[in-house]
Image (cartoon, rainbow, N blue to C red):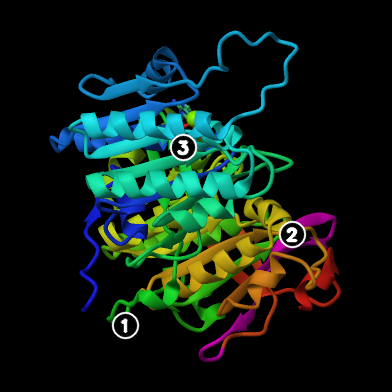
Amino acid sequence: MPQPKAIKIPTGIPELDAVLHGGLLQSRIHLIEGRPGTGKTTLGLRYLIEGRTKGQAGLYLSLSESVDELREAAGNHGWSLDGLEIVEMIPLPSEGVDDQTILLPTEKELSSLIDQICERVEQSTATRIVIDSMVEIRLLAYDSSHYRRQIIALRQRLTRKGVTVLLLDDLTSDGREFELQSAVHGVITLEQIEHAFGAARRRMRVVKLRGGNFQSGWHDYAIRTGEILVFPSLIAQEHHRPGDGLEIFSGIESFDHLFCGPLTEGSSTMVLGPSGTGKTTVALQYALSAVKSGHHVAYFNFDESETTLRSRLVASMGEKSDEDDAGARLQESDEENRFHLRRVNPSRISPGEFIWSVRRLVEDLNVRMVIIDSINSYLDVIREEKSLLRQMHELFSYLSNMNVMSIIVGAHSARLDTSKEPDALSLITDNIFSLRYYEHQNVVCKAICVLKKRQGRHEHDIRVLTLTDDGIQVGDRVKSNDDTIGAASLEA
Ligand SMILES: Nc1ncnc2c1ncn2[C@@H]1O[C@H](COP(=O)(O)OP(=O)(O)O)[C@@H](O)[C@H]1O
Ligand SMILES: [Mg+2]
């Protein structure tokens, strides 16, 4: 007999439903496991509230927190618990035992608690159930086989009732509760990684979902007031968009001459150089050109504060304006000129969330050029977690598959060390511009050259770069008797 296809029900978190390919398994038991503070209670409440909006009754059985504490947790998110059945069922030690006695849980104590839980569920009209948390049940078991037997009894009675259950588990009892994982139909693990700097990073993984498909691997998530945001991990090869041969010239003749042509769709370009050499200005020159020809551009800024950036934008985009309304006008032109500025703080936003916001701009707004200025801030994060480099590669392959141009700004000190990032990333980019300083008759000047161009020819000269009120200009070849600072940076 063919297995009936699993029916999925939404969790209230749309992106989690996407990871679960529709949601939780209806009439099945799910384990949500994670250390204290990972957001299990929040997820459980969100799940019941989602049911309430759909007219499905919900029951929260709390074995550890009081109703008041739960109300407070919900209040933190601006959620009301009205209409939900909240039951406090905190197991207390048997009466008449003084503090000196070590309590040995008895088989009867645990089975009577399981009985009470099942009776509560059976009396209720609720179809969405949360039991928080399993630790209290585990503590009453005298060994793991006792625990497992009771869990199976619980599972059978709840499944018979046809309710969809979330069992929350703190993972605080000794050893990993594989007996619990194997006794349920679905398992989601929540994790919190503490970094030496910045906010803790949260990630989740669906461990199993019996009879249902799901997106495997880790997905970053965040808890914000009023919502849990899940950022499904990116699989570049699942995304393709047909090209239309888009090409973007910088619009500066001398610059396009140096590069011998335009940037092409799907290509990735690194702009490398020490701080202050004009990397952002070069990137913005292409952005301006794309925007002028009617395309959407996303500019992710990691380093500068938005105000300095806005005034620089105004300047570099050659718009004459007085200080006062510069910001306002740019805000307006954000819409009108299809220029999407996003300020990102990498210590606050996980790579998963960053990648997700890039995807939204590409898929929802048809952005054709993405600028990341600069990648360095993320490199600190990448150094702590090597897997992030792979995620970045995935992002660039995705952009290429979607025929989006990417420009990645990378700052490095005068000496280029190819064994280090961002040069590790430069291996996967199609084009590389290198900017640097040199000294000429006791004046510090700037120079630019093209180190790499994957398609077609490019000039090999090192040329003078000047930043003027009218934008960038590429000038003569730098003369050999000029004293160069950081000559090594040109010999990648
Ligand atoms: N308004 C809020 N904005 C952002 N994070 C919040 C907010 N309220 C609670 N949190 C976070 O949610 C987490 C608590 O979630 P909770 O569901 O109680 O975890 P668990 O049940 O797994 O112990 C904490 O890490 C806390 O920082
Ligand atoms: Mg909790």
Point out the frontmost of discs 2 and 3.
Answer: 3
| Horizontal arrangement in the rendering, residue 51 relative to residue 386 (left or right) | left
Q: Is residue 451 magenta?
A: yes
Q: Nearer the viewer, residue 85 or 483?
A: 85
Q: Give the structural element (helix, strand or loop) at label 2.
A: loop
Do the residues bearing badges 2 and 3 touch, measured as CB atoms within 8 Å? no
Mark 1 C-beta closer than 8 Å to ligand 1: no
Q: Quadrant of residue 383?
A: bottom right
Label 1 crowd (10 A; few <14 / some 14-19 / many >=20): few
| Range covered by the magenta-colored residues | 434-457
- Residue 190 percent across, percent down from the top left: 52, 46
Question: Is 248 above or below relative to 409?
Answer: below
Q: Is residue 477 left or right of residue 120?
A: right
Does the image show residue 32? Answer: no
The spot of residue 359 in percent (x, y) is 38, 60
Q: Is residue 48 above or below residue 166?
A: above
Task: Give left or right: position of 241 versus 352.
Answer: left
Pick whichever of labels 1 and 3 is earlier in the sequence: 3
* Crowdedness near tag 2: few (<14), some (14–19) or many (≥20) residues, C-alpha within 10 Å: some
